[in-house]
Structure formats: structure tokens, C-alpha cells
Image (cartoon, rainbow, N blue to C red):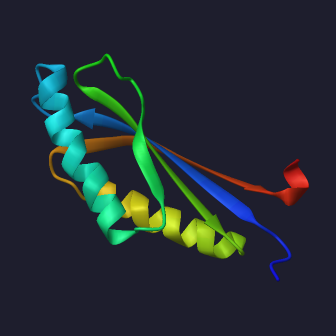
Amino acid sequence: MIDQVYVGALTLDLLLGDVRSLKQKRSVLRPIIAEVHKHFPAVAVAETGDNDLHRRAEIGVAVVSATAANCTQVLDQCERLVAGRPEIELLSARQRLFNDDDG
């Protein structure tokens, strides 16, 4: 039986390269989101903000775990994976951790 449940959330603020339309934006974001999901199939990942801006994007990642350390480790790895993409610049990353005591 699990004593605690932790939910980790990661918000990534991205600056995209030479993107001139929302269609081009989606063609840049789709492979990034797919790669995160491929490497970490247990996480949820999606575009979560800046939907109407061509060169900016926000991606959210969420993970559920029995330990805070595992949440943090997975989110750190997701952040490094996205930050390593040459077609984007990671402007900021924000991690949050929630557990049963937060309710």
C-alpha cells in the first residue's frame, strides 16, 4: 500500500526559432511532445499556454509517483530532454510538487 502520493508538475516556457505561423509552431512542438512521451511514457505532456503566439510556447508535464524524489528526477530528465532540442530556447522552467498533505 502506498502511504503518500506525489504529483509533480513542470512548466516549460519556450522560444521557438524561425516560426511564422501557428501551423509551423505545431510542426515544431508536435515532435518535442512526442519525444518526451516516447522517453517517459508514464508522464502526461501537452501544450498548455501561449497558444496564439507564433514564437512562444508553454509545455506542461505531469508525473505521479510514490516518492517526491522520483517526481523530481523524472521532471529534471524531461526538462533536460526538451532543453537539448536545437530548434528551441528554454526561457524558464518551473517545477511544483504536490502531495496528500497539500489538500
Q: Is residue 93 left or right of residue 9?
A: left
Instruction: Give the residue furthest to the front.
Output: 1
**Image quarter hosting the N terminus:** bottom right
Q: Is residue 33 left or right of residue 17?
A: right
- The image quadrant that residue 77 belongs to is bottom left
User: 97 or 45, which is in the foreground?
Assistant: 45
- The image quadrant that residue 64 belongs to is bottom right
Above or below, 102 against 64 in this view is above
Residue 76 at what x, y percent from top left?
48, 64
Residue 84 at what x, y percent from top left?
25, 59
Residue in the image at 67% along x and 58% along y: 7
Instruction: Give the residue furthest to the bottom.
Output: 1
Above or below, 61 against 47 in this view is below
Q: Is residue 44 left or right of residue 32?
A: right
> Is residue 81 something that shows in the picture?
no
Residue in the image at 35% along x and 61% along y: 37
Above or below, 20 against 67 in this view is above
Residue in the image at 59% along x and 51% along y: 9
Instruction: Give the residue furthest to the top.
Output: 52
Above or below, 68 against 99 in this view is below
Residue 101 at what x, y percent from top left?
90, 56
Residue in the image at 72% along x and 63% along y: 6
Number of numbered discs = 0
Residue 58 at what x, y percent from top left?
40, 35
> Is residue 34 something that shows in the picture?
yes
